[in-house]
Structure formats: structure tokens, C-alpha cells
């Protein structure tokens, strides 16, 4: 056991030590500096942005001097990836791994001129950013030639060129592996570069290097969205987007694509259940992504998966958003709408309507998207009506004047109880956003949940207009 020799410390030294300890406890290790010179950007405001999941935040800001010199600081809390930003300039990314960084170049819009003079991990990052795109382009070219020599009988017998093509592909792949394996063990850059490569190469893999599809999809599924390294990487959103884009564009039939998406959703959820905050963040974003891409089978699966299988607590807005899929999914019977119209000659509820189909639209005059979509429905109404489709607009307005001004020219029935989100019809249909659209048959069975007027109009054209034209006269 080591023996510590006591010594006398005067009060001023004690005070200094106490202050140092307090500073260490509250601020962690000393801040690191990013210094640089951008010769074409004098007297500009420069920001250092950091990332937390789907969001970014300002780490530090400064101004370049007359020669373009600047200094920015970051702390251990900002580890991960940072982006240097100047107005009207492209962001320049750096690794915030606890090292001082020194840069020199012309401008952020000319990244090829920027050199990393100090910072080992950033020098590795710079080198890989220069070399890897060249390897990727060359690999895609060799892949194309390989297909030509394999599929075209004119070249098929040329074994020597084919062997040379495969040899060069192997050399390029080996060079990439050697670079990545040679990075410092446990460094941030050794984790980040393979993930960045995965995320950035999906379009090339889908189009030209389809043999890599299974491995790329498997790597996406293995990502842990609770990992702080990924959360701070600036790739959080891109990893989700590109994962599901790759599945959507993998060349398989749509039924098989949905099966693959369900497997991927299961893989994401298996790790996210450990972290409520990130579960809510990823689920909210992924659900919206699937909806925007009209991948309703996948969004429904995600909603039911989270509602039924996940033990974590969902925030109220997300829970309401997902609950609509359990209560209002395709095949369910929608609740009867109560119209409460003053004119007793008009239908008083949805079940009073006598038509084959009804489009129920929830919206409001204060909803910017509704001011585009609902008038667009009015323009389509005559065509839809001829095909047996009625429209009912349920307004969430709170003001009678606003409601009447917005709906006065609509050719279909418009109703409003002036209770906004607290209205009975809104609650019964689990509406959490506007516009929300449902297509119902004459038994109120939910046939479709269109995400736009265009999708609904396409359904009318495909199932009704063409269907009627195809019927024998």
C-alpha cells in the first residue's frame, strides 16, 4: 500500500484546489480548441454545430478575423461529430474526439483545399474522405464491366480480362479494409467511418453492387440507436432514411419488401426498448417517414408493435398518433359521424348517406396544408361524385366566421362543432393531425387512409374509372 506523506497547505492553495475541483466536477475535462484559417472568408460568423439524435445544437460561435483566422472550443459533452458552418457555405464536418484540431484552407465551399494540420482522428477522417469515394467509383465501374463480361456472350469467353476485373475489385476492397482495420482501436473515427460508408453508399449498392445488399441490410439492422456514438454522429436521421430506402428499392416485390421492413422494425425495437427517450424519438420519426412514403403496411406494423409489445412509456402525442392505427386501421368499421347540421333536410349523420364510398376529411382553416389539400378535393369532387364517392369535411375550427369563410365555396358537406381537438368526431376517429383522410365504403369499413389528395385521386382513377371502363356494356 502506498503511504501518503501529509504536508502543510496554506489557505490560498486550499482555496485554489477547491475551485479547481469544483470546476472539474461541473465542467469535466478542459475544453478543446478548433483553430483554423479560411483565407477567403474574413470577418464572417462561424458556428460549430453538434448533434443529438435527430437534432443539432450550437456548440460554439466565433468570428473570423481579417485574414480568416478563427478559434472555437468544445467540451467532452460534445463528443461525436461536429459541423463548421458559415452562412451560404457548405458545412465542413470534424470529429470531436477530445483532441485539438487545426485547419487551413480557402473556404468551406472548397473542402478539397482544407487540410487538417493537427488532430490525428481528423487527419484519418480527411484521408478516408479523399480516398474512399475514388474506391467506390472504381468498384462500381468494375462491377459494371463484370456484368458485361458475364452476361454478354461476346465477352463471356474472355477469361483473362474477367480474372483481371475480379482481381482489381478484390484489391480495392482489401485496401479499404486495411485502412479501416489500421485505425486506432476504440477511437471514435474507427467506429464512425464504416457507418458513414454504409449510410452514404446505399444508392450505389442498390443500383450497381446488388451482391452487397444482404450484407448492407444486415449491418443496418445491427445498428444500436441507443449507442451514444450513433446518437452524436449526425447520422441518426440518415441511417433511418437510408435503411428503409434500401429496403424499398432492393428490387424485391412489394409483399417481400414489407416482410423485410417488419424484420428491420423488430431489430430496431429490440434495442430501443432500453431507452424511452430514444424509442419515442425514433418511432415518431420512422412512423412519419413510412407514412410519407405510403408504406402503410409497415407503418401499421410499427404502430401495433410499439403499442402492443413495448413496455416503455410513449409520450402522449406519439401514443395518440399510433393508437389511430389500432383503432382506425384498414378493415375496421369507422364510427358514425354526427353532423348536427341546422338544416334538418340534410343528413344528420354519416350513416344517413346513400352512396358507395365516402371520403371523410378532418382539417381546419388554420392548417396551412389543409388550405392546399381541401380546395384541391373540391376541384376533384365532380369526378369523384360521378364514380359514387361522396366527401364530408369535418372542421376543427373554433370560430364560426373562420369556418364559414373557409368552406363557403366547397361543393360537399362541411360540418364543425367548434371544439377543435375536443370534438366528439375528432376523438372517435383518433385524429392527431390535420389534414387526416379516410376512405370508407357504404358499410363504413375503412378501405384506405390516403396521405394526400393525389393518392385518393389515383385510387379513384385506378379502381373506379378504369374499372367501370373495363366492365362489359
Image: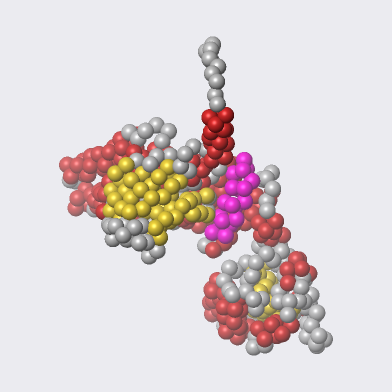
Q: Where is residue 375, by image quadrant?
A: bottom right
The answer to whether residue 168 of the structure is visible from this angle is yes
Pick out the residue farthest to the right: 344
Is residue 285 a member of the stretch shown in magenta?
yes
Q: Please identify the quadrant where the C terminus is shown.
A: bottom right
Q: Position of residue 71 (x, y in %)?
A: 38, 50
How is the protein colored in the picture? secondary structure
Taking the spot 65% from the left edge, 67% from the top edge, the residue there is 433
Q: Please identify the quadrant where the N terminus is shown.
A: top right
Q: Report the front residue among 26 and 173.
A: 26
Magenta part of the chain: 272-290
Q: Position of residue 258 (x, y in %)?
A: 54, 53
Q: Report the front residue among 449 and 46.
A: 46
Q: Position of residue 426 (x, y in %)?
A: 73, 69
Q: Is residue 315 left or right of residue 351?
A: left
Taking the spot 46% from the left edge, 42% from the top edge, the residue there is 31
Is residue 170 a member of the stretch shown in magenta?
no
Q: Position of residue 348 (x, y in %)?
A: 80, 80
Taking the spot 53% from the left edge, 33% from the top edge, the residue there is 16
Q: Is residue 430 left or right of residue 113?
A: right
Amino acid at each position: 500500500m502506498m503511504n501518503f506523506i501529509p504536508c502543510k497547505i496554506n489557505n490560498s492553495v486550499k482555496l485554489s484546489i477547491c475551485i479547481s475541483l469544483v470546476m472539474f466536477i461541473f465542467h469535466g475535462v478542459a475544453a478543446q480548441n478548433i483553430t483554423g484559417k479560411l483565407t477567403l472568408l474574413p470577418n464572417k460568423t462561424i458556428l460549430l454545430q453538434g448533434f443529438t439524435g435527430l437534432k443539432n445544437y450550437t456548440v460554439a460561435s466565433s468570428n473570423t478575423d481579417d485574414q480568416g483566422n478563427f478559434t472555437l472550443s468544445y467540451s467532452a459533452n460534445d463528443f461525436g461529430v461536429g459541423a463548421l458552418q458559415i452562412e451560404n457555405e457548405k458545412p465542413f464536418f470534424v470529429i470531436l474526439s477530445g483532441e485539438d484540431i487545426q485547419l487551413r484552407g480557402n473556404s468551406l465551399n472548397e473542402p478539397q483545399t482544407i487540410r487538417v494540420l493537427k488532430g490525428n482522428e481528423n487527419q484519418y477522417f480527411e484521408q478516408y474522405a479523399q480516398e474512399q469515394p475514388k474506391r467506390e467509383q472504381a468498384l462500381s465501374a468494375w462491377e459494371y464491366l463484370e456484368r458485361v463480361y458475364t452476361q454478354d456472350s461476346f465477352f463471356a469467353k474472355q477469361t483473362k480480362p474477367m480474372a483481371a476485373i475480379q482481381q482489381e475489385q478484390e484489391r480495392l476492397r482489401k485496401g479499404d479494409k486495411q485502412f479501416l482495420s489500421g485505425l486506432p482501436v476504440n477511437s471514435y473515427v474507427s467506429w464512425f467511418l464504416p457507418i458513414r460508408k454504409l449510410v452514404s453508399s446505399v444508392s450505389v449498392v442498390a443500383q450497381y453492387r446488388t451482391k452487397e445488399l444482404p450484407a448492407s441490410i444486415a449491418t443496418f439492422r445491427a445498428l444500436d440507436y441507443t449507442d451514444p456514438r450513433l446518437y452524436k454522429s449526425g447520422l441518426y436521421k440518415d441511417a433511418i432514411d437510408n435503411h428503409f430506402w434500401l429496403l424499398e428499392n432492393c428490387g424485391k416485390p412489394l409483399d417481400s419488401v414489407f416482410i423485410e421492413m417488419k424484420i428491420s422494425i423488430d431489430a430496431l425495437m429490440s434495442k430501443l426498448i432500453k431507452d424511452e427517450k430514444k424509442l419515442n424519438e425514433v418511432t415518431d420519426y420512422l412512423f412519419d417517414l413510412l407514412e410519407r412514403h405510403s408504406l402503410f403496411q409497415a407503418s401499421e406494423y410499427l404502430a401495433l408493435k410499439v403499442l402492443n409489445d413495448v413496455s416503455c412509456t410513449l409520450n402522449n402525442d406519439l401514443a395518440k398518433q399510433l393508437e389511430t392505427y389500432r383503432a382506425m386501421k384498414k378493415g375496421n368499421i369507422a364510427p358514425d359521424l354526427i353532423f348536427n347540421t341546422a338544416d334538418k333536410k340534410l343528413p344528420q349523420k354519416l350513416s344517413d348517406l346513400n352512396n358507395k364510398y365516402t371520403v371523410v376529411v378532418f382539417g381546419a382553416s388554420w392548417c396551412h396544408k389543409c388550405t392546399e389539400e381541401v380546395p384541391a378535393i373540391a376541384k376533384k369532387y365532380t369526378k369523384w361524385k360521378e364514380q359514387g364517392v361522396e366527401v364530408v369535411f369535418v372542421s376543427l375550427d373554433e370560430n364560426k366566421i373562420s369556418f364559414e369563410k373557409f368552406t363557403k365555396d366547397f361543393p360537399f358537406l362541411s360540418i364543425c362543432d367548434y371544439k377543435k381537438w375536443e370534438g366528439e368526431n375528432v376523438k372517435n376517429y383518433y385524429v392527431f393531425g390535420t389534414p387526416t383522410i379516410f376512405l370508407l365504403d357504404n358499410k363504413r369499413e375503412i378501405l384506405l387512409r390516403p396521405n394526400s389528395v393525389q393518392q385518393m385521386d389515383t385510387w379513384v382513377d385506378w379502381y373506379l374509372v378504369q374499372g367501370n371502363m373495363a366492365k362489359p356494356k
